[in-house]
Amino acid sequence: LSQIFSPVEEAHEMTADNGTHGASKRAFILRPVYVMLLFIAFMILHGLFVQESFLVHILVGDAVDTSQQRLVSQHRQSNWNGVSGISENGLLMDPMQRRNEISFQVDESFRKIYDKIDSEDEATRCERYGFTYTQGTKRRRVFFAALVASDSMDVIRIHATETYDIYHTVALLESNTTFSGTARDLRFRPGSDLYNFATSGVFGSSTQVFIDYWLADAPDAKGMLRESIQRETLIERWKQQGMKPDDIGVVGDIDEMFSRDFLRAAQVCNIREFQEPTASDCLKPKIVPSTIIFESSPLCRKHKKWFHPDIVLGSCVDQIGDPSARMVPVRGYQRTHGNRLKGYGRPENDYRSEIVSSGRYPLWSVQDFRSVGGASRQHNWVRVANKTGVTEWGVAFHIHNFFDDLDAVRHKYLTYGHADQNNANKTLSEISADLDIVVRCIHDLPNSANPKPNPRLEKAFKDIEGPTPIFFSNETYRQIRHEHVRKIVVDDEAKFGSYYDDDVKANSTKPKQPGH
């Protein structure tokens, strides 16, 4: 402090016509550089005492006021209306004004895979999926959007590795409440490890990643309705990033991704859903994949396939495409939010007569990607002729239940979209048929161990035909992850028991039917 307000000799020279000089005098002057140091020291101490993130204070700067800084660093269950920067729909856009420096370095083994996939002849690639190719076609930009919550760093890494430098924009959204309305801490807040990793360049050196926050006070919106309302707001980031009608929108959960090869095809191939009349009428504009599911471990694969994420061309996306002469669909919550009502595309292809006669169907909200069945076919299968005939492979991946620990697994099934409060003390197999797959996989129990199994693919990873996530090409990761999941299961069984007793594990006899 003595250096901030220091006595110095200040000579005041007053030049006059007669050349006389004023006298010198002592004065206390303020040195700006020391004031700045004092301010930074104060902010450090302030951050420590009130348990707020120092990175938020330093990096966010003037982007948000004090209320918002608290808002993004901790949860407070209250009405956020009136807080500066939060929109009427409860959305706080990513407040970080300066993006993280690109610090992520791609593994050389992955780069070789990228080079092999990306350099393939486009006509050959398109033909593989039943599409055609026009020479000189400009690549379509790809915009991705997803909700995030308890997702692990593993899931982000797997998704980002598959899609490295393909997405133009990644729009992620986190809420300070679960789908059941209970309070939760923000895990992706600015300055957190997850935030820094997601914005480090892991999705690509040219991909822009944003994490926004849904902080609305909507106590009457629960379950999947709450998810729907949150998902709708993701369009705001796409708009801000300049999405155009000829761009591609991809909507999924962060643990769902198209294969790199198929995304490259979607960027350049002549695809029915991207051409007229579909690109204008928007009746069936959605591309639905056949999705391969991995449960908790790269070595535990579900036999059944999934059907997300989803793709829609920008010309049919709400607030991006042309809205003229189109009816706005009435929805289930306050008429403007949630799923479409009957006559507006739900059930599938059920439209009011005036919409049908106009030939101009409603534009698709980000939530509609997920909930409206506007696809002409689940057609995105790789068809390869080989010595055994024609093999059909999935073109997307669902990296399901890849949690870091036991608490995260159980918390999901207690609080999220399909929550069941009775799950608190059940065994993993009783909680979910998907978790039962993991239990059987870890203990190497065959499908026959369960009278009505949710079957897993009983094949070694090396024997799986068709594409697998690029990140799973790392054998060391596959083994480490599988052993980590084994520990999660064993620890859970020690605490909550197992649906399969020791004799079943030893002899693979049939137990009681697990939950489905």
Image: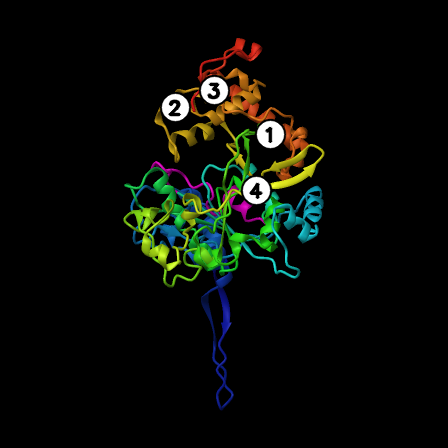
Residue that numbered label 2 is attached to: 424
Q: Does the magenta stretch include residue 276?
A: no
Residue that numbered label 4 is attached to: 159
Q: Is residue 512 above or below residue 237?
A: above
Q: Which amino acid does label 3 sit on?
A: Lys
**Residue 365: percent from the left, percent from the top?**
41, 51
Closer to the observer: label 1 or label 4?
Answer: 4
Q: Earlier in the sequence, mark 1 or mark 2?
A: 2
Instruction: State the residue at coordinates (35%, 56%).
Output: 355
In the foreground, 205 or 12: 205
Q: Which of marks 3 and 2 is nearer the N terminus?
A: 2
Give, as a single range, the part of the protein colored magenta.
176-201
Instruction: State the residue at coordinates (51%, 20%).
Output: 491
Residue that numbered label 3 is attached to: 452
Label 1 to label 4, Cα distance in Å? 16 Å
| Quarter of the rendering occupied by the C terminus | top left
**Residue 422: percent from the left, percent from the top?**
35, 24
**Residue 462: percent from the left, percent from the top?**
68, 29
Residue that numbered label 1 is attached to: 481
In the foreground, 292 or 280: 280
The secondary structure that dominates the magenta segment is loop
The local crowd at label 3, few if under 14, some if 14 to 19, many if 20 or more residues have their Cα within 10 Å, is some
Q: In this view, does 293 lie above or below 162?
A: above
